[in-house]
Amino acid sequence: SRHVVIAGAGHAGGSAAAMLRQLGWQGAITLVGEEPIPPYQRPPLSKAWLKGEATTESLLLRPAHFYPDAGIDLRPGTRVTAIDRAAKAVTLSDGAALSYDFLILALGARARRLPLPGRDLGRVLELRTVADADQLKAVLHPDARLAVIGGGYIGLEAAASARALGAEVVVIERESRVLARVAGPILSNFFQDYHRGQGVAIETDAQVIELDAADGTVAGVRLGDGRVIPCDATLIGVGVVANEALARDAGLGCDNGIIVDLAARTDDPAIFAVGDCTNRPLPLYGRMARLESVPNALEQARQAASQICGKPPPAPEVPWFWSDQYDLRLQIAGLPFDATETVVRGDIPGAKFALFHLAADGTVRAVEAVNASTEFMGGRRIIARGKRLSRRRIEDMSVSMQELAA
Ligand code: FAD
C-alpha cells in the first residue's frame, strides 16, 4: 500500500494526518513525533494550562484513541533522524527505516537560545512544550518573582498568567516597546499600559548582560545599565527558530524555514512541509514569510493533504492570529506589510477597538482587534477582497462593519 510518513506530531503534523483521512487517503500513514504524547495544542500552554485551568484531555488535538481508530500509526517519543531522497526513505531514532511515497515535514520551531552567561542555571526556563510549561507552572506560586526576558506574545501571555497566580512579574525588552517585531506602536503602547495597570513592571530599551546565580539557581537578571532585577525564576521568550536542519541536510531549499509553494511542496515533489518550519508564499502580499500560528499550520496541512489526495487546492486564506491576556482577546487579520497609515476604530481606553493598517492607496492590509471580534471578522473579508477604505468611514462608528465589508 502507498505510504505517507509525517515527521513531527505537533499541530501541523497531527492535523495533516487527520486531513489525509478526511480527504480519502486509503494508504498507510505513519506519524512520527519526538514528544512523548499525542499531538496537542500549544496556545493554552501560556494561558489556561499555565493557570491550572486546562486538563490534558483538553490540550490534545484529538483523543488518543483517534489515531488507531483512523489507522494512523502514531510513534511518539521518536525522531526522524535522516531523509534519503533517492531511496524515498527516512531513518528513525529507534533505528527503524521507513520508506515513503510522500513525506510531510511538520518539524515546528524551537525557542531561540540566547548566548547569555548564566543561561544554564536552574530555573532559567523557556516555553514551547508542555514539559516546559509544567516547569514554569511549578515555580509560579504567589509571591514568586518572575523575570521575563522578551516582550513578545509568549512573554506577555506568560506574564498575564503569572499575575493571575499572584506572582510578581518584570518584563525585560530590548526594543523601545513590547511586541515591537509583530505589532504597531499603538498596540504596543496599549498592551504596555494594560500590563502595568495589572502590576507588571516593564523595562524597555533594556539589555540583558548576564544572569546572576545563588546556589546554582538564577537569582537576578543583570542589565546593561548596571541594575540587577532580582528574581526566583527567568523565562526567556525571544522568538523561535525553524527546525529545518533535517531538510537542509537532505538538500532541500531553506531560508529562514523550509521553502514551500502554495501546495506546501518543497523542491522535491514527494516532500511537503507544513507549519512553523516553513517559509511560504503569501499571495495576498506578494512575498514569502514564515508564520507562527495555528491557522497557518491548519491551512498548510490542508494544502499538503489536498495535493497528496489529488483534490483541488484550497482557496488561499487571510493569515490570522490571536492572543489572550487578562480579559483581552486580541485577534489580528492580515499582516501590516507595506502599510503607511493606521486608523483607529473604537475606544482604546475602554479596551474595545480595532486598528486598521492601510497601504498608500487605501487598501486594508491588516486589522488588529482588541475585544472587537466583529471588526476582526469584517477585516478578514475586507483584506481577502483587497478592498480600499477611507479613514473617515473606518473611524465613523455609525457606519457598521457590515457596511464597511460590503
Ligand atoms: P509544533 O507545534 O512545534 O510541532 C512540531 C513537532 O515536531 C514538535 O512536537 C517537535 O518536537 C517535533 N519534531 C521536531 N523535529 C522532529 C524530528 N526530527 N522528528 C520527529 N519529531 C520532530 N498560535 C496561535 O495562532 N495563537 C496563539 O494564541 C498561540 N499561542 C502560543 C503559545 C505558546 C506557549 C506557544 C509555544 C505557541 C503558541 N502559538 C499560538 C503558536 C502555535 O502553537 C504554533 O504555530 C503551532 O504549534 C505550530 O505547529 P507545528 O506543528 O508547525 O509546530
Image (cartoon, rainbow, N blue to C red):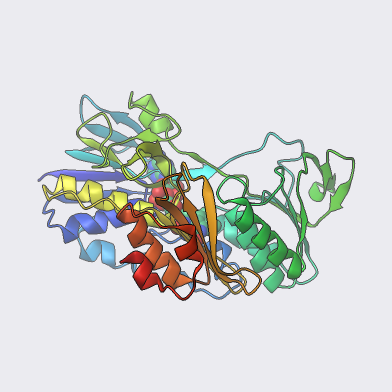
Image point (41%, 74%), residue name: 400
Question: Quick check: 120 left or right of 52?
Answer: right
Picture quarter with the C terminus: bottom left
In percent of width and height, residue 160 lies at: 66, 66
* Location of residue 299 in the rendering, given as x and y in whole percent from the top left corner: 30, 53
Which residue is more in the foreground, 30 or 287? Answer: 287
Residue 73, image x and y in percent? Answer: 25, 54
Q: Nearer the viewer, residue 303 or 368?
A: 368
Give 206 or 57, whichever is nearer the viewer: 206
**Among the 4 quarters of the image, the one containing residue 279:** top left
Q: How many marks?
A: 0
Q: Residue at x 37, y 34 (%)?
A: 258
Residue 186 located left or right of residue 22: right
Asked whether the viewer can see residue 231, the reply is yes
- Figure quadrant of residue 145: bottom right
Q: Is residue 75 visible?
A: no
Query: Seen from this angle, which residue lies furthest right?
Result: 226
Q: Locate residue 104 relative to residue 372 in the image: left or right.
A: left
Q: Looking at the image, which residue is at 49% across and 58% down? A: 391
In this view, which residue lies farthest toward the front?
392
Between 238 and 107, which is closer to the camera in this rendering?
Answer: 238
Q: Residue at x 68, y 73 (%)?
A: 164
Query: How far across and how far down the image is residue 346, in percent?
Result: 55, 70
